[in-house]
Amino acid sequence: MNRFDDLELYDRGVLPVVGKLRNYPAGLESPRHQHPTAQLLYSVEGLMWVGTERGQWIVPPTRAIWLPIGTWHQVKMVSPVRMRNIFVRQDMLAGLPEQCCVLEVTPLLRELVLAAVDVALPCEPGSRDERVMMLALDEIRRAKVLPLSLPQPASPALQRLCAVWLDHPDDARGAAEWARELALDPRTLQRRFRRETGLSFGQWRRQARLMLALQRLACGDSVLKVALDLGYASPSAFATMFKRELGAPPSSFFTAS
């Protein structure tokens, strides 16, 4: 085989590690689906939104999302995407993440993913191609987990709260005011929110603003418009938050990526 184009082989986990490339236009949405292999979902160019039962995820070009075996997910291309995937069979998962997470893509991991999708499969035991695949797994194990997820609460009341706020991300009301709308004590709201999402309400909103900002910037909106629409007092306050979380200012993030 010169190229690995048999979907049945990679999707059924016949081979231990497989690289696969796909290119998609902006706006395309995949159907909700799952794989019997774990998946590193990565875009060398473009921004992806990924929805799972655990929440929502944003994946810019300096990041990848890890999806464990059997994770139901849907992918939306926010901008044109050059997707590069690595699929990993169950017996190769030792030391790899057990939950969905966004991972930092180092320069080495990026090059290994690009090399993996060009590997002719199946690999010969002990070959250079097999070593590339194994080193890619080593780098995934070492990758830093990053805060680009938006966990979904389980209870209908908190789900409604989140949906309303996402429609109006410039809403500056605090937890006490939202608690009154739900007829809850503010401390009860915070306890339930943390129990169901792992985040305080304030942390969840910061995560949501960051994800919304990435989508808007990828679609060409100005930093000024995004900052004001998301409720920041000034573009500089928004830029400070953005750089703290993602390591680059919003004005140059996608260029740097």
Image (spheres, rainbow, N blue to C red):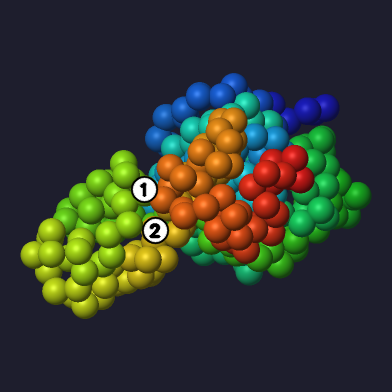
Residue that appears at 59% across and 55% down: 236
Which of the pair 126/50 is nearer the observer? 50
Q: Residue furthest left?
A: 183
Which of the pair 122/38 is nearer the observer? 38
Q: Looking at the rendering, which quadrant does residue 135 occupy?
A: bottom right
Label 1 – label 2 distance at C-alpha: 8 Å
Q: Looking at the rendering, which quadrant does residue 255 occupy?
A: top right
Disc 1 on helix, strand or loop? loop
Residue that appears at 12% across and 69% down: 184
Q: Residue furthest front?
A: 234
Horizontal and vertical percent position of residue 78: 54, 32
User: Which of pointers 1 and 2 lies earlier in the amino acid sequence?
Assistant: 1
- Name the quarter where the C terminus is drawn: top right
Q: Is residue 142 above or below residue 224?
A: below
Q: Is residue 103 above or below residue 42?
A: below
Q: Residue furthest top?
A: 25
Disc 2: CA contacts within 10 A as few (<14), some (14-19) or many (>=20):
some
Residue position marked by numbered label 1 in the rendering: 169
Horizontal and vertical percent position of residue 231: 41, 51
Do callouts 1 and 2 mark residues in contact (Cβ within 8 Å)? yes
Q: Is residue 104 left or right of residue 34?
A: right
The amino acid beneath tag 2 is Arg
Residue position marked by numbered label 2 in the rendering: 205
